[in-house]
Image (cartoon, rainbow, N blue to C red):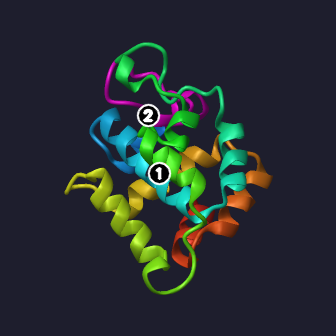
Amino acid sequence: MATTNTGSKLPIADKDRSFLEKVMIRGGLADPYDARDITEVVFRCMRDLMTTEAADRVADELRGEEAVAAAGDKSLRVGMEDLWKDTNPLVGFLSRIRPPLHGSGAWRFDADRFIFRVANESGVPRNVDTEQVIQAVFSATKDELTQERIQEVADWLPDRICQMWKRA
């Protein structure tokens, strides 16, 4: 069990934390907006490596869960499935029609590119380790998926990112 620094001193069981709160705490982030924005980019990078069918199976398991508890800022009340699909309609559309980003040359999507994209596209704060926050997103995501889906995601991830996924 972990405790929060705000409100009651009673410990909150990890299973009772909202998705974005888990990402925020595990990733060392200061606010849930950063957790939301970073999660969306981590999910985008994950989807870019997968077929549309595999990504849809992940979305199906995330469906119906709220990223943040009902109380609080309405802009944070976005379902995990919505973050997975991408809140940007154009990016969401393109991710459904393009093939998985594998291969060599310009299409090579290795661990370094994954980390680079998360750091640069999501605006990871300077005082936060990008790999730590990626692992935080992975950990919170795995809390919501079946073992079958966890393994399927692992099968799509490149080397070091796959190891991070497995450790999360």
Disc assigned to residue 136: 1
Q: Residue at x 48, y 15 (%)?
A: 70
Residue 47 colored in magenta in the image: no
What residue sits 52% from the left and 76% below the top? 160
Answer above or below: position of 20 versus 140.
above
Q: Which region is colored magenta?
A: 1-21
User: Whole-percent x and y of residue 122?
Assistant: 31, 51
Rendered-image quadrant of the C terminus: bottom right
Q: Quadrant of residue 157?
A: bottom right
Alpha-carbon neighbours of circle 1 within 10 Å: few (<14), some, or many (≥20)?
A: many
Seen in the picture, residue 133 relative to 114 is either above or below; the reply is above
Magenta stretch encompasses residue 8: yes
Please tell me which residue lies in front, 143 or 93: 93
10, 4: nearer the viewer? 4
Q: Please, what is the dominant secondary structure of the magenta stretch?
A: loop
Residue 27 point in image, percent of width and height: 39, 49
| Residue reaching furthest to the top | 71
What's the residue type where badge 1 is placed?
Ala
The residues tagged by marks 2 and 1 sit, at their Cα atoms, a distance apart of 10 Å
**Label 2 vs 1, first from the N-terminus:** 2
Give the label on residue 21, or none.
2
